Image: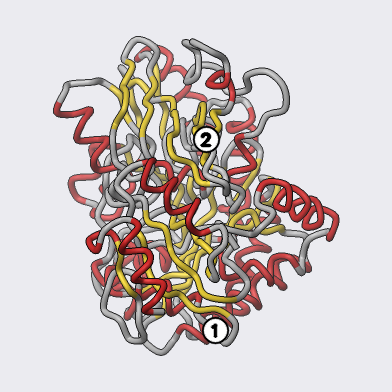
Amino acid sequence: MEKIISKLTSLLSAASIIAIQDNDTSDYQFLADRINNDKRNILAAVIPNTVDELQKLLAFSVDQDFSLFNLLSPGEIGTAPIPISGDIVVIDLQRMNNIIEINQKDAYALIEPGVSYGQLNKHLEDNNIPFAVDVEKSAQQSVLGSICNRNFGYTPYGDQLMMQCGMEVMLADGSLVRTGMGAMPKSNTWQLFKYGYGPYMDGLFTQSNMGIVTKIGLWLMPKPPAYKPFMLQLPNDAAMEQAVEILRSLKINMLVPNTVVIASAESEVMQFIDGGLSATFDNSTAEKHQLGTWNIYGALYGIPGNVDVVWGAVNGALGQIDGAKFLLKEDTTKHPIWAQREKIMLGKFNKRNSELDNSAVINLHFASPIEGKDALAMQAIINSHSGEQNVISQLALTWRTMFAQLSITYGKDQLSAAKKLADTLIKAFGEQSYSVSQSDADLQDSVDETRHPGLKTLNQRVKKALDPQHNFG
């Protein structure tokens, strides 16, 4: 280990290398906890400052006795596959954080991997640039990392990969490739037309270790002249099932354009109320916190007259549900959870339960049709397996898909139980035809057991072509 650290230090600088040891207190200890086992071990984190330094690292690493693991976002294990065995060096691109371009006329940004949502939003606000950025978790999260993890946020631009346009990627041999129209000499449409000419490559570098994305373009959402957020509280499972059936049409016809969220009272308390992870839940929980048994969050965006017309249709469709209660923007002043949910639907940062700052999380997403029966079935799987473990869950309705998004929280000495639950849930959801759409990287083996082997074989063939020496594991 000391020999490798010494070589890395001579290649870059001591300030760019952080050794990771057992019971380390650094920001990378969570990675060691999740990744290290009897076959693999994290030695260090390398924090390059420039593309040139990253290129040096990759060129140096080709014939070394360790593999590289690209950390997509600080504090998250992410979705890029982890090297199966041997020593591992983590690449953290947080210092490569230039906002290269904000184009107001064509509404796009070109940024480096270290740019956080907080940094990008501050830049827009400080320069009075009237765009909103779809955020998935927090101000500290990497924008590029969130896109490459294929996260969903809560605005009409919530399908973050769909709103991505153009990449610069460093391959395992250190060569740089620009995708889409960026491959064309003197192109002025790199951030305007996603697909370019020929095979569409961008997806290869999401949830993958095929290469390292060093620049990414994203479309920015103009702040709408009219914005009407709503919360719909529902009294029971039957009402929620009915609401999902109604929402399917509203989503397919794009009447409600953002990612619509459905969450139980218990999950909302765990996520947004201080002390919520330690709370005791019973039949009074919803009433105590001014919630429904189920709670739906959505918003309308656009021209005032059009928003009014669409609201009439949405209100009429969902308002017919027995026991349904709407809350609107003016109600946020007296409702702490609704106030936090409303913010994020316009790309603003919200405040979560402070206990979550001291808890680690395992993330799992499962996909299903937008069907009421599937909503109830997926919740039943969670309820039947979670036991004493805290599982914060929500349903996220996108274009034609409903995702069950799960966060298994765990404290010190609870990782083993949390991973066991994650493995159980992957199997249980798969048995009922609910496929994994996203998982933390250390759950890859469990996910592979639920998939047709042909896709895994294809991934391996592409990996061999792009990274024959397995520089990235």
Q: Nearer the viewer, mark 2 or mark 1?
A: 2
Q: Is residue 319 visible?
A: no
Could you say where residue 132 lies in the image, as x and y percent from the top left?
Answer: 32, 29
Is residue 436 something one can see in this rendering?
A: yes
Q: Amino acid at mark 1?
A: Asn
In the rendered view, does 184 fall on the left or right side of 28? right
Secondary element under disc 1, as helix, strand or loop, is loop
Q: In the image, which disc is placed on residue 176? A: 2
**Extreme-bottom residue of the structure:** 413
- The answer to which quarter of the image holds residue 377 is bottom right
In the image, 163 versus 395, the foreground residue is 163
Mark 1 lies on residue: 37
Going 57% across and 70% down the picture, which residue do you hit?
442
Callout 2 amino acid: Leu
Q: Nearer the viewer, residue 90 or 125?
A: 90
- Quadrant of the rendered image containing residue 22: bottom left
- Quadrant for the C terminus, please: bottom right
Query: In this image, 192 relative to 353: left or right?
Result: right
Relative to 60, does residue 422 appear above or below in the rendering? below
The structure residue drawn at horizontal position 41% and vertical position 19%, both measured from the top left corner, is 307
Q: Quadrant of the N terminus?
A: bottom left
**Residue 73 screen position, x and y as percent:** 39, 54
Q: CA distance from mark 2 to mark 1?
A: 33 Å
Vertical side of 20 occupied by 318: above or below: above
- Circles 2 and 1: CB atoms closer than 8 Å: no
List x then y, in percent, for residue 113: 38, 43
